[in-house]
Amino acid sequence: MKEKVDRSINRIDAPEKTGGYAEYIADMKFEGMLYAKTLRSEKPRAVIKSIDIPLLPEGCYVVDKNDIPGKNRVKMLLDDQPFFAEDIVNYIGEPILLVVGPDREQVAQVLSNIRVLYEEMEPVFTIVDAVKCDKASIYGEDNCFSGYEIIRGDPDRAFREAAEAIEGEYRTGLQEHIYLEPQGVIGVYENERVTVYGSMQCPYYIKTALVQGFGWDEERIRVVQTTTGGAFGGKEEYTSIIAGHAAFAAVKTGRPVRLIFDRAEDIICTTKRHPSIIKIKTALDKNRKITAMEVEITLDGGAYAGLSPVVLQRAMFAATGVYNIPNIKVKGRVFATNNVPSGAMRGFGGPQAFFAIEMHMQSLAESISRDPLDFKMENMLSKGDLTVTGGVLRYEVKLPQMIDLVEKMSGYRRKYEAFINDRGEVPKGIGLSIFYHGCAFTGSGEKEKIRARVKLKKRKDGKVLILVASVEMGQGSSTTLRKIVARAMDLPVEDVIYENPDTDIVPDSGPTVASRTVMIVGFLLKKAAERLKAGGEKAADFKVTEACEGPAELEVTEEYEEPGYIKWGHEKFEGDAYPTYSWGVNVVEVEVDPVTFVIKVNGIWGVYDIGTIIDERIIRGQMEGGIAQGLGYAAFEVMNTDCGNILQPSLADYIIPNSKEFPEMEIRLIDNPYEYGPFGAKGAGELPFIGAAPALASAVQNALKVPIKRLPVTPEYLLKVAEGEK
Ligand code: MOS
């Protein structure tokens, strides 16, 4: 038998933990640590004919597809994306190899001397071209990553019998997350095990991806989240790629390997929000009542599928908005292009769909000379009605009260009338959006894919440890989860401990996504806390961790159980697409510069139903941040590409709104407890984003008296619209 040698790797400069101290991945240093930099494709679509690597200086390494012991595919829905390109590249920025070495400048120097010989292929950059093209991505069967259809009632007949049908086409563009902290990981190989530390949302997604990439037993893989400076979906699936890179490099070199992006690299190669084209056609009877709706959603998935199929599903489940439509046809497809892969971003398909449906309803009402808000309210869903997929809305829908409240706060109706008749020098407008967000995973995802588990441990000194895989990424979940447990156990919050997840210690409570953390994981923690308070079980498999110096006395594990009322048929997308919904109403007031078409936001009001509030300050932060990010998407953040090159690769070019851009937001929260959420809480994080763009675009429509059909609403677009272009 081989003698076991301790090959531990030491942290250096590991500071004392004191109150208020946060350690980001860039603060972590290990003995003998090497730096990695990525060689990326310069072509949007090409065959790699050869790679010419100069003689490497001592201590420098190249890590590529040949250094992947398992499968060169990043574990995701369709498993189509390689960690390192094989013989084909499909977008500019696709990783080909890493150069790794002890000196950062030397690494950059080596990298710049590598020559790749490409044989270019015909690339595809737009949705319109992608629909026509046979195959832009080498890895799929055809050029469509996935396509689905939802049919409820008899939409064809309703359209045949309609008195009139009104159509619109809506388009949305790219959006970049701009989390404050760019992506970064460190891979460490010691004692036959790999550990990846990093800024992330989903430690277990990364662990699963590494298990597949290495082809190793899962015991040999460990993933540890470091303090994470924002994510917004951008660290949901993307981080698995670079975690693989750093881990493969660590194993090859036997040294810790650090891979941290600067802003430009981060913008160029990480996922973006899916661009979309959404066509909506509405059938009206002779009394101008809506009898049917047909929605066709097409998304630009970029070069690899990633999470696109689920983003598309979420867009489809939001296709008819908050409206009660008797006959529905929704067709959705996501296509491959040679753009950077699209991926998860706050709202996950919802923002595109709600922009389209809200603008359509506004334009439809205006085209039949109805007041848009009256028309929307007449068609609005309420308790007992069916969702787009035929699920029953089992809980009270408080939209009428919420609209009343936002009307009182903003004076929407009076201003809408005044502005529509106003022909003043500076056009002013006000817009109102009504929306929801489905809480937690779609369909049977929570039950079948995730099966969340949580654990609580109680120490001899009475302190309780929360063991979950859910991360704190600035959204406040650590405080919220601690408050839930503290309240359920009648403990002071200080006695409940939460630390960044480490897959060696925490069970898999699922990814930190889909506005599920508080509602799903928090509810399990509440149940666990109640059982722990009542006694719990003797702790058996206790590991001593930094968070827990003393031995634990008691522990409790809880596992997700689906509420009995949920019925879902995945083949036809029939039934309850979500356990429940959070709701919102958003009003935005603007003025538009008559010469430059620059939009100035003069007022922002929002009313939200997210069940019960656990921590009001955190929720206000989420609502205000979501609105600001949503307004950025609406009008301020412009990301264009030219032949696959991103034209705004820095924060000087890609302008996100700053704190001075917007007036103070007035936010109200409605209490509407959900029986399967902790103390009644539902999902909150994504909801406020969704309503912002349609509210702003409606306000611009009110100001300029022309239909707005594009996001972002840039001055260039408004100039064209004002000149009569459709
Ligand atoms: Mo996500 S967009 O982090 O569900």
Image: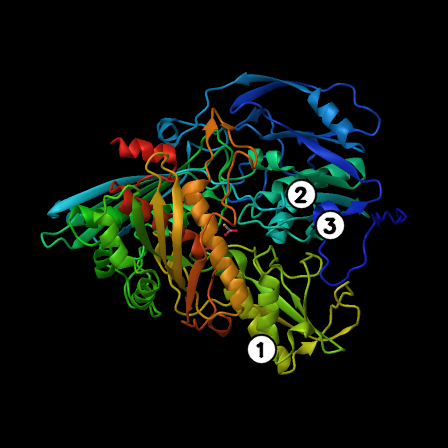
Determine the residue positioned at 55% across, 69% down. 524
Q: Is residue 454 above or below residue 211?
A: below
Seen from the viewer's position, the closer of residues 219 and 143 is 143
- Say which residue label 1 marks: 488
Using the rendered image of the protein, determine whether residue 298 is visible from the camera's viewpoint.
Answer: yes
Residue 237: image quadrant is top right
Q: Position of residue 149 (x, y in %)?
A: 32, 46
Left or right of 271 on screen, residue 211: right
Cα–Cα gap, marks 3 and 1:
36 Å
Q: Position of residue 309 (x, y in %)?
A: 44, 44
| SS category of the residue bearing label 3 | helix
- Say which residue label 2 marks: 184
Using the rendered image of the protein, determine whether residue 155 is visible from the camera's viewpoint.
Answer: no
In the picture, the disc for residue 228 is: none
Determine the residue positioned at 88% across, 46% down. 2
- Are there few (<14), some (14-19), or many (20+) residues within 10 Å of tag 2? many
- Give amino acid for label 1: Ala
- Give amino acid for label 3: Arg
Q: Quadrant of the C terminus?
A: top left
Cα–Cα gap, marks 3 and 2:
21 Å
**Residue at far bottom of view:** 534
Mark 2 and mark 3 in contact (Cβ < 8 Å)? Answer: no
The numbered mark, 3 or 1, whose residue comes first in the sequence reads 3
Left or right of 606 on screen, residue 69: right
Left or right of 278 on screen, residue 505: right
In the picture, the disc for residue 220 is: 3
Cα–Cα gap, marks 1 and 2:
36 Å
